[in-house]
Image: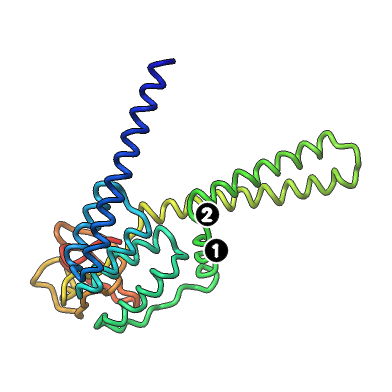
Amino acid sequence: MKSKIIISAILLFFSFTCLKAQNEELDKANSLYKQTDYQGASQLYEDIAIRYGVSPELYYNIGNAYYKAGEVGRSILNYERALRLSPNYEDAKVNLELAQTKVVDNIVQVPPFFVKRWIDLLIKLLNVDQWYIVSLVVFVITLLCFLYFIFGNQLIIRRFAFYGAFILLVITIISGTFGLIRKSELSNHNEAIIMTGTVVVKSSPDKSGTDLFQLHEGTKVSIKSKLDEWTEIVVGNGNIGWLETIAIEKI
């Protein structure tokens, strides 16, 4: 018993120490940002992300620092990362739209089918943990309805409990599925940002391939496949081609 208390105390001490160190480094990065040392601030924010983990707010700060430093591609990359973790992060949305006005490529996006668009918006209303909580709560209510259907006395209420349990079971499955989809989006996404000033997209994965079109820093693409040092990408307007993997960075 005493050993458990000692271990808990040690873990608590190290957690407090790490949190204190993280806050000190954040204060330093924020100070550099206020002093207009945007390169220094962005690098320190990046170091904090590596040492202590990421968050939507940290990605947002990194994006702001890079935007002020004139690095449009990296600012868009980090605003997109913030929105991937927190799709309803309004400040990140506003700043992303501002940064995108600096992108040379004016690509007209092919809109997805409206049903898919609605489902995507619904899925992004909550994060992974929130969808799992909804699924768990609804499942518990489903069990209560089912138990009342079996053991209840009043026939009318038992009938409502049966139909209610069926509907709630469907909601449980849907919310759990949405949680799995959100988790998959965070770990298995295939979107990337062009990081170099100008890149030539080729018809095949080699430098001797035919030049198809050019893309510029900050443009968002989807990764279709990879071959050695080359990546096949799809642009928002549906154009497909190959570029060197070093020219992009995954969101």
Residue 34 in the figure: left or right of residue 170: left
Q: CA distance from mark 2 to mark 1?
A: 9 Å
What's the residue at 41%, 56% (across, down)?
185
| 179, above or below 77, in the image | above
Q: Residue at left 20%, top 80%? A: 213
Element assignment for label 1: helix
Q: Which residue is mark 2?
A: 178
Is residue 146 found left or right of 31 in the rendered image? right
Which residue in the rendered view is the most extreme toward the left? 208
- In the rendering, at what x and y percent does residue 212 appear? 19, 79
From the top left corner, tell me how far across and down residue 4 is, in percent.
Answer: 40, 20
Crowding at mark 1 (Cα within 10 Å: few <14, some 14-19, many 20+): few
In this view, the residue in front, 104 or 2, is 2
Q: Which mark is on residue 169?
A: none
Q: Is residue 79 above or below residue 168?
A: below
Residues 202 and 140: in front is 140
In depth, the one of 17 and 102 nearer the eye is 17
Q: In which quadrant is the N terminus drawn?
A: top left
**Residue 14 in the image: above or below residue 176:** above
Mark 1 = which residue? Answer: 122
The reply to whether residue 242 is in sight is no
Question: Mark 2 Cα within 10 Å, few/some/many (few <14, many 20+)?
Answer: many
Q: Position of residue 11 (x, y in %)?
A: 35, 31
Q: Residue at x 57, y 52 (%)?
A: 175
The reply to whether discs 2 and 1 touch (Cβ–Cβ < 8 Å) is yes
Q: Amino acid under label 1?
A: Leu
Q: Quadrant of residue 13?
A: top left
